[in-house]
Image (cartoon, rainbow, N blue to C red):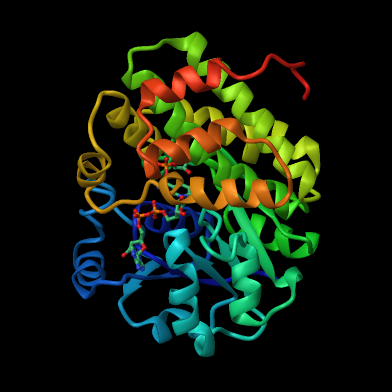
Amino acid sequence: MAIERVAVLGAGSWGTTFAKVIADSGPEVVLWARRQDVASEITETRVNSGYLPGISLPANLAATADAAKALDGADAVVLAVPSQTLRVNLSAWKELLPPDATLVSLSKGVELGTLKRMSEVIREVAGVDESQVAVVSGPNLAKEIAVGQPTATVIACTDHDRAVDLQHACSNSYFRPYTNTDVVGCELGGACKNVIALACGMAAGMGYGDNTMASIITRGLAETARLGAALGADPLTFAGLAGLGDLVATCASPLSRNRSFGERLGRGETLAQAQEAAHGQVAEGVKSCSSIRELAAKHGVDMPITEGVHQVCHDGLSVRELGAALLGRDRKHERQ
Ligand SMILES: NC(=O)c1ccc[n+]([C@@H]2O[C@H](COP(=O)([O-])OP(=O)(O)OC[C@H]3O[C@@H](n4cnc5c(N)ncnc54)[C@H](O)[C@@H]3O)[C@@H](O)[C@H]2O)c1
Ligand SMILES: O=P(O)(O)OC[C@H](O)CO
């Protein structure tokens, strides 16, 4: 089914950027903003200055603070809120969802408490089959895409035809989406890389260079792939855009909120100071390190970097102690 009208719920960095990507690809887009002043600013000036200063949004992108208006007649509903808030937000929108619309998750995280992936939360709250839920994940730093820098991504859905419809709706001269049916692998790649980026940031903040970075990225990918194997993901997904691609972009970029957050901790700032510097924007890994750690324990998977990041963020371990703990572990084979 051709997608002609899309609702994007969440007007933060990625929600606003992805709304622009779709509008630049052809469909009509209505962007829902939690705050009326953000919706009004976009309507009146075509700019969301709080999240994407200087970026002019296209004419086929409308904004509203009324979710019913955004959702009316939508062929696809894109969910662009922080992962730990998805359940509450979606519960409020549930009765307004058009029955056959593709529900698309942009959020990268694992829910605290339930240990569910975002597509699982969507299925549960909206009461839909897995074939109706898609996930977008890849090396997608919003600020680069907003200025039209070339980027690829993955649209994962167990229903390949639905993924292809969505692929058509967001393909343009600067954005190239690939499809994949491995929803589990794509979601785990997106959630876990935030935690690994925190660790890379900590190392950078301590003054360590590229060898340390590459070591954390590679061993971070190894532990992500181990969790994926336990949860039935396709191992090859982790060598793709939603695995290695996103991991490299997030761990290396000063634009990443997770990496920047970790860097502040590495320089000796407290969690509260790093949180204040984020100006209300989410560094998803700070919460997801706990849910991913718990998910790994539940499945008997060893994730030492995730464990260490959790201890730094929530148990008072210092970044120096984390480095020593990781290097002091038992020696082992690379593929264990
Ligand atoms: N920014 C990026 O480059 C990027 C890229 C890919 C994926 N993501 C993922 O997309 C999701 C959204 O990220 P973002 O960058 O748009 O985040 P953001 O912090 O920039 O914006 C979050 C948006 O959600 C809204 N929101 C609704 N309910 C909320 C609540 N209870 N608490 C806080 N905000 C609430 C906010 O008003 C805001 O519009 C995250 O899971 C993130 O990991 C982000
Ligand atoms: O800014 P971050 O760390 O949330 O990362 C943004 C995107 O997920 C990169 O793909």
Report whether 178 appears left or right of 205.
right
Is residue 300 something that shows in the picture?
yes
Residue 159 horizontal side relative to residue 272, left or right = right
Residue 160 at x, y percent in the picture: 79, 59
**In percent of the image, x 79 and y 64: which residue is there?**
159
- Residue shown at 53% from the left, 84% from the top: 94
Using the rendered view, name the quadrant where residue 2 is placed. Answer: bottom right
Residue 200's x, y, as percent?
A: 45, 25
Q: How many marks?
A: 0
For the point 50% across and 30% down, the residue is 249
Looking at the rendered image, the quarter that the N terminus falls into is bottom right
Between residues 36 and 83, which one lies in front from this camera angle?
A: 83
Does residue 171 appear in this view? no
Q: Which of 326 and 73 lies nearest the eye of the viewer? A: 326
Residue 303, placed above or below residue 34: above
Quadrant showing the C terminus: top right
Name the spot of residue 23 as percent of width and height, x first: 46, 60
Residue 169 position by quadrant: bottom right
Q: Nearer the viewer, residue 185 or 26?
A: 185
Quarter of the rendering containing residue 113: bottom right
Residue 86 at what x, y percent from top left?
48, 68
